[in-house]
Image (cartoon, rainbow, N blue to C red):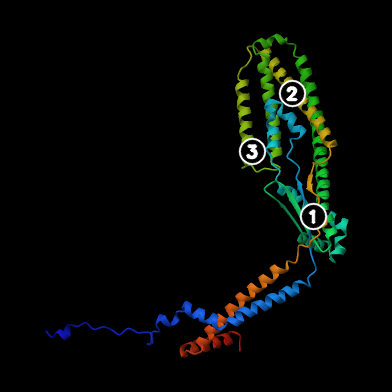
Amino acid sequence: MNPENMTPSVSAQPGPSQGGGGYEDDEISLLDLLLVVVDNLRLLVIGPLLIGLGALGVSYTMPPIYTAKTQFLPPQQQQSSAASMLASLGALGGLAGAATGLKSPADQYIAFMKSVSVQDALIERFKLVEKYEAKLKTDARMALTGSVRIASGKDGLISVEVDDKDPKFAADLANAHVDELRSLLARLAVTEAQQRRMFFEKQLQITKENFTKADLALKSSGVSSSVLKTSPASAVEAVARLKAGISVQEVKLGTMRNYLTESSPDFKQALSELASLKTQLAKAEKEEPASKDASDYVARYREFKYQETMFELFAKQLELAKVDESREGAVIQVLDIAEPPERKAKPKKAMIAVIAALASGFALLLFVFIRSALKNASQDEETKLRMASLKGSWNRALGR
């Protein structure tokens, strides 16, 4: 066999110069980019420099803005007198746990200062509709929000910063935020205490009537207290306390629903405590007295002790609510009172010039790269055809 016939045939592969268009033609080397930069070096240097100088000149025409700042320590989370009293009542102290377990983050006080109520008070106090040349109060609120920054730091302090052309006005407006917060907290505290007082007045009246009925029922039983020998008085009183504890725990859960979801850990813990109290009560009530007379007397005695415990609780709660109602609002400790700043905070001329120069430099660099790419593309016949096709498609899309 002829060796020449054994030589495998190799199909011709398109090279860079053939119709396949080798990938080498599409590559852009770092050297090519560097050459583009060098060819346009004057534009890339002088252009950003001139634009930066122009921005610097414009910054001198901007009105100076002054920033006044005040810092204060928000009201500390204090245990109310009502919660303090509940804490001393043993099984009834669960309600105190709910009160003291609540945390009042600085975000809450920041939200107060950003509220419509506080903003409207500031708008009226400083006549901000006229100052900001706003058509509506809503526009004044937006302008106020744009000139004020309220934030809290890791140290627990809340800062209020106000920007304005007038340094004295900026300081006054910053301090006024703290004043309005203090007034709002005082109003909220009085309202809460009033509601609590009215609630306990009603509960005390109802409990007083029930207590009187239980006392009369116990006295009219006609049974001697000696029957308690079969069911010790301490055990009976324990049952009464458990019933009172269950009642207060149910009140606690009703209150917690106002500010917690049922999936929160505190709410689940309160449910667990209620279930535990009910279990203890069921166990204690299994110990029945020996006789029918004793059973009747013990039931009446338990009801009497229950109503007595509830009456004492609500009477103390009412007195404490009255004390809270007479108190002043939460204490805000101001660390730094805002003073009219001596130096302007804006505009920062150097920063404006640098940012303008960098931004324009990037834009010019992108421009020279695109211009170079289009120039190279215009020299290639295939690319010319593609560009013409693209132009035609674009015109058809525009209906031309």
| Label 1 environment density (alpha carbons within 10 Å; few <14, some 14–19, many ≥20) | few
Q: Position of residue 218 (x, y in %)?
A: 75, 16
Q: Secondary structure at mark 3?
A: helix
- Tag 1 and tag 2, C-beta contact below 8 Å: no
Q: Position of residue 204 (x, y in %)?
A: 80, 29
Depth check: 39 or 226 in front?
39
Q: What is the number of the mark on residue 116?
A: 1
Q: Position of residue 84 (x, y in %)?
A: 74, 31
Query: What is the quadrant of the C terminus in the image?
Result: bottom right
| Label 2 environment density (alpha carbons within 10 Å; few <14, some 14–19, many ≥20) | many
- Three-letter code for the amino acid on which mark 1 is drawn: Val
- Which residue lies under the disc numbered 2? 309
- Three-letter code for the amino acid on which mark 2 is drawn: Thr
Query: What is the quadrant of the N terminus in the image?
Result: bottom left
Q: Position of residue 87 (x, y in %)?
A: 71, 29
- Which residue lies under the disc numbered 3? 266
Q: What is the number of the mark on residue 170?
A: none
Query: Would you identify the image quadrant in which residue 170 lies?
Result: bottom right
Position of 349 relative to 274 (above/below): below
Residue 206 visible in the snapshot: no
Residue 17 visible in the snapshot: yes
